[in-house]
């Protein structure tokens, strides 16, 4: 099959690689209808580049091509959303809703390719009734990672009705965090952004205020906007030390910072900074499968439209241009069509 | 008045100091019935000793001696519990239940003395109906700090019915954390302790298991006791890096570490260690006033008896012996009678 591969820093290619195969009876192979580029794909692209030419891309939706002998709930022809983290949905962690810590955790490895493998089909996949309209594909694709991740940030931050929420980060995850907070009943959603196109999406998703300032100035602006109190809930959707410190500082005493940006290597925080004001910290890899049924319902009934985060679509052949557009912040999130 | 004062490392004295006075109309002066020594008093005692001879002691109960002109709800003669952190109970943080971040925060400064001042009487104090029995005094005194602090740890860790809870720390706060977790319906409460007298109090308070091992061995033991899953909630009641790392490691994915041990100077944690397993961190100075009415009800109806943490009582004259007993771990917590 043809798939996106990474060969070195900023060296993205489309290569012929072996088709994935069913090696265990719980697996499935999906023909990818749409994949996309994640902000976290930019890290190996920019710096930790893998010279071995491995496939890349962990977000995808598509049609089941083949299932293993033990797969009960899916058949070839089903249109499915693939949570980027695959889970058995039967282990103690899955039963507690934390399927991103599944005892049989797996990940989508070739979401920017023609075919991809699901390591735990029954536990992971969610299907639609029949083949969805083409117009629905972006929002369904967003359910494989970016929207549930934004939802996880808001859940971890314990956003509730009437809250004033701050979202640190205007990438696709931050924007989905705005959408989640708004959907959870936040009265005021303040997004930190200095990027006009993203501010527009944020407003579309329910942001009521935009703060363009950063660091001390950004913190001061938010404290001012909240009458000196701070935010009831804060979503940290970047993963840098700068973003985390800002998030902690704008939280009101008793509030929790929900963090879903993978913390950058070496980031450390002083528990004293949390202790002094009773600010909580809670986050991690989103348990996508836990949120997926509810979020799918919201997409299907039109109450959320997370597909708006895709502002560029490229055919698989031009995936390298997609990476460049995200790297240079010309695109918020890029959909890839095999 | 006579009060406990600290003059240098391990130099505790009883000195004649000026009586506290009403300087603002919202204040009150309380004649101390009983005070006590807190684990956190041992820090300046052991190392950061204050050579100026300041008074020490932030936990006390007693009888109101005098109130300022604006105090509406209390009169001389009332028996009151004094939350160690005083609050107005009207600012936005108090209204949100976080009165340890009150805009008008104050602290008890001479709880191991004959008289002590309350900086916000109406917002802070809770009184009993009449003078309580002498036998009730230790449990009422425990409500000024140690019991609400243990309760805060369990609240922050989101202990719930049926949970398996680990308590790191067998000091008086940890023991009160055991009592809180048990009272909140935990099915299993595992306390980490290698001190026999404290293990007995812990069992009395509802601990079902004792783990004497520490660090890697202690973590392995708890993972084994929880069938490889980890604890549903963890209370960190020490404040050292060792205790915090243990607490994070024994938490199951999705669980929260409620921490109330003041984090030692320089402690840093890597958010990656939390992120990888979706372990939350939430804690700080206990909002004593928020919990006080409910906890007082439980003490009065006999359903909790936190006064059991006091295993030594000394008259004020012998307060230095009380410090030595706690310093040398001969006593868990020492009650001081002026």
Image: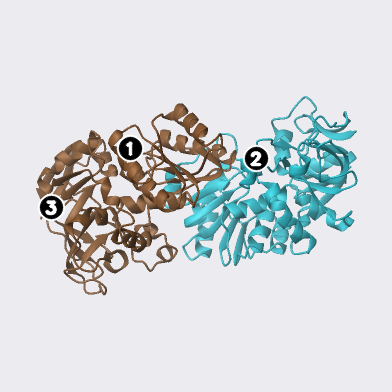
Chain colours: A cyan, B brown
Q: Where does the image place residue A281, in percent across and percent down from the top left?
A: 52, 48
Q: Where does the image place residue B75, in percent across and percent down from the top left?
A: 20, 72
Name which quarter of the figure residue A163 lies in: bottom right
What is the chain letter for disc 3? B
> Which numbered dot is residue A91?
2
Q: Residue reaching furthest top?
A: A52
Name which quarter of the figure residue B76 lies in: bottom left
The local secondary structure at tag 1 comes to helix
> Which numbered dot is residue B226?
none
Q: Are marks 1 and 2 on the same chain?
A: no
Q: Is residue A4 above or below residue B334?
A: above
User: Disc 1 to disc 2, how far (Cα)?
Assistant: 34 Å
Q: Nearer the viewer, residue B324 or A314?
A: B324
Q: Are marks 3 and 1 on the same chain?
A: yes
The reply to whether discs 3 and 1 touch (Cβ–Cβ < 8 Å) is no
- Report whether B172 appears left or right of B8: right
Location of mark 3 (residue): B338
The residue at the point 52 percent across, 59 percent down is A231
The reply to whether discs 2 and 3 touch (Cβ–Cβ < 8 Å) is no
Location of mark 1 (residue): B199
The local secondary structure at tag 2 comes to loop
The reply to whether discs 1 and 2 touch (Cβ–Cβ < 8 Å) is no
User: Disc 2 to disc 3, how far (Cα)?
Assistant: 58 Å
Crowd class of label 3 (few under 14; some 14 to 19; many from 20; radius 10 Å)? many
What is the chain letter for disc 2? A
User: Disc 3 to disc 1, how far (Cα)?
Assistant: 30 Å
Is the N terminus of chain A in the top left, top right, bottom left or bottom right quadrant?
top right
- Report whether A312 appears left or right of A47: right
The residue at the point 69 percent across, 52 percent down is A291
Total marks placed: 3
Residue A22 visible (yes or no): yes
């Amino acid at each position: 099959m043809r798939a996106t591969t990474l060969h070195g820093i900023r060296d993205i290619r489309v290569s012929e690689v072996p088709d994935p195969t069913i090696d265990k009876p719980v697996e499935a192979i999906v023909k990818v209808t749409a994949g996309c580029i994640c902000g976290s794909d930019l890290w190996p692209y920019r710096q930790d580049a893998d010279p071995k030419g491995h496939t890349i891309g962990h977000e995808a939706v598509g049609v089941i091509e083949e299932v293993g002998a033990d797969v009960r709930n899916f058949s070839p022809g089903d249109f499915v959303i693939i949570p980027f983290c695959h889970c058995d949905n039967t282990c103690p962690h899955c039963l507690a809703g934390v399927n991103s810590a599944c005892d049989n955790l797996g990940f989508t490895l070739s979401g920017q390719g023609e075919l991809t493998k699901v390591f735990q089909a029954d536990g992971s996949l969610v299907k639609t009734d029949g083949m969805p309209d083409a117009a629905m594909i972006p929002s369904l694709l967003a359910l494989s990672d970016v929207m549930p991740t934004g939802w996880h940030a808001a859940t971890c931050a314990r956003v509730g009705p009437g809250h004033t929420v701050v979202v640190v980060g205007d990438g696709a995850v931050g924007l989905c965090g705005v959408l989640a907070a708004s959907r959870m009943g936040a009265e005021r959603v303040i997004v930190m952004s200095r990027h006009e196109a993203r501010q527009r999406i944020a407003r579309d998703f329910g942001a009521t205020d935009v703060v363009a300032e950063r660091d001390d100035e950004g913190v001061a602006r938010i404290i001012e906007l909240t009458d000196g109190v701070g935010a009831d809930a804060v979503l940290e959707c970047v993963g840098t030390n700068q973003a985390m410190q800002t998030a902690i500082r704008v939280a009101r005493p008793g509030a929790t910072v929900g963090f879903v940006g993978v913390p950058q290597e070496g980031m450390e925080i002083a528990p004293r900074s949390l202790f002094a004001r009773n600010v909580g910290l809670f986050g991690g890899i989103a348990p996508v499968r836990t949120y997926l049924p509810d979020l799918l319902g919201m997409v299907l009934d039109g109450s959320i439209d997370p597909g708006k985060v895709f502002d560029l679509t490229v055919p698989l052949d031009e995936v390298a241009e997609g990476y460049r557009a995200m790297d240079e912040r010309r695109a918020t999130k890029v959909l890839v069509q095999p």
